[in-house]
């Protein structure tokens, strides 16, 4: 089970918070849906088709990412995977998308909007811990969305440095090794239970963040902290002044 809201508020000994970004810090699904609807409207098509097309696009992108993580296909950048998935989704769509629209929409991963609580909460957390991004997004994507969204990090790491994708164990080992982190003093923060399980397998502590549509813990999941958003996390783990 996840830790309840009445569970341990400030796990002892944590020095570093490692954040998943896509879905946890930024609203990936909502941003992609809005971008897809806007792209359809721009070419004179019905923007109401946007959410459905966006879901199909994301489903295909997740499948490709999973194949890379499982070693079933060679590593490709997140941009490349998302572009390939978009071409598949657009081809399956009855009305299709204009080529120039596809080209612009394929870069929507650089424009993902933060959840409303994320920028301020990250600043608060950065005053008490080392805060690190560890994402399947490319470094270029992370740079663009962090700059546009006001996301403050002490370090940004992409799975592309390990030439694979989470939850491949190589990604978590890479982060721990590159930053010389003690996993017992490191907490993974994510809205995806699969991400937290993989981090816990390396001895990392875990914080589950509830985000709409991003994953529901299994009955036997056990996380150190379970919170409603990053503001809630900051209230739990940062000692009041």
Image: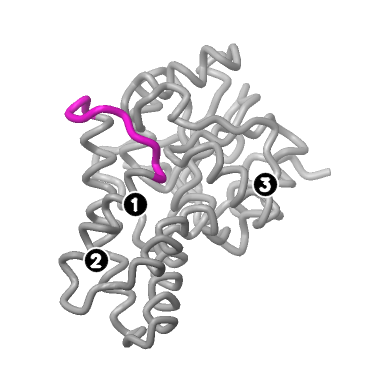
| Element type at mark 3 | helix
Q: Which residue is mark 1?
A: 83
| Element type at mark 2 | helix
Residue 8 left/right relative to 125:
left
Task: Spot the residue most to the right.
Answer: 241
Q: Where's the C terminus, which quadrant? A: top right
Camera-side mark, 1 or 3: 1
Comes first in the chain, label 3 or label 2: 2
User: Residue 188's spot in the image, x, y percent?
Assistant: 49, 33
Q: Nearer the viewer, residue 145 or 153?
A: 145
* Residue 221 visible in rendering: yes
* Residue 207 visible in rendering: no
Decide whether residue 74 is among the magenta residues: yes
Question: For the residue carrying disc 1, how many other residues have a C-alpha within 10 Å: few (<14), some (14-19), or many (20+)?
Answer: many
Q: Nearer the viewer, residue 62 or 232?
A: 62
Q: Which residue is mark 2?
A: 90
- Asked where in the image residue 117 lies, by quadrant, the reply is bottom right
Pointers 3 and 2 in contact (C-beta within 8 Å): no
Gap in angstroms between the C-alphas marked 2 and 1: 10 Å
Tell me the residue at 70%/32% (across/down).
154
Tell me the residue at 45%/49% (across/down).
22
Comes first in the chain, label 1 or label 3: 1
Where does the magenta region start and end? 70-79
User: Residue 95's spot in the image, x, y percent?
Assistant: 21, 79
Residue 187 left/right relative to 38:
right
Camera-side mark, 3 or 2: 2
Tell me the residue at 16%/77% (across/down).
94
| Element type at mark 1 | helix
Q: Which residue is mark 3?
A: 122
The image shows residue 1, relative to residue 24, as above or below, that is: above
Q: Where's the N terminus, which quadrant? A: top left
């Amino acid at each position: 089970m996840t830790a309840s809201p009445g569970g341990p508020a400030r796990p002892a000994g944590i020095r570093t918070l490692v954040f998943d970004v896509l879905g946890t810090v930024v609203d990936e699904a909502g941003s992609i849906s809005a971008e897809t609807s806007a792209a359809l409207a721009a070419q004179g098509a019905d923007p109401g088709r946007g959410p459905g097309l966006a879901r199909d696009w994301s489903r295909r992108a997740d499948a490709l990412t999973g194949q890379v993580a499982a070693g079933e296909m060679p590593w490709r950048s997140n941009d490349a995977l998302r572009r390939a998935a978009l071409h598949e989704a657009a081809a399956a769509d009855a009305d299709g998308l204009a080529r120039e629209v596809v080209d612009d929409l394929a870069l929507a991963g650089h424009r993902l909007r933060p959840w409303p609580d994320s920028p301020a909460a990250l600043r608060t957390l950065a005053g008490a811990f080392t805060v690190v991004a560890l994402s399947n997004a490319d470094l270029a994507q992370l740079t663009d969305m962090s700059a546009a969204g006001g996301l403050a990090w002490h370090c940004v790491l992409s799975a592309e440095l390990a030439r694979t994708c989470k939850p491949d164990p190589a990604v978590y080992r890479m982060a721990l090794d590159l930053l010389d982190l003690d996993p017992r003093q490191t907490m993974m923060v994510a809205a995806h239970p699969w991400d937290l399980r993989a981090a816990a397998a390396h001895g990392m502590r875990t914080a589950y963040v509830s985000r709409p549509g991003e994953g529901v813990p299994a009955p036997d999941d056990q996380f150190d902290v379970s919170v409603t958003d990053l503001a809630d996390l900051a209230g739990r783990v940062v000692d009041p002044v």
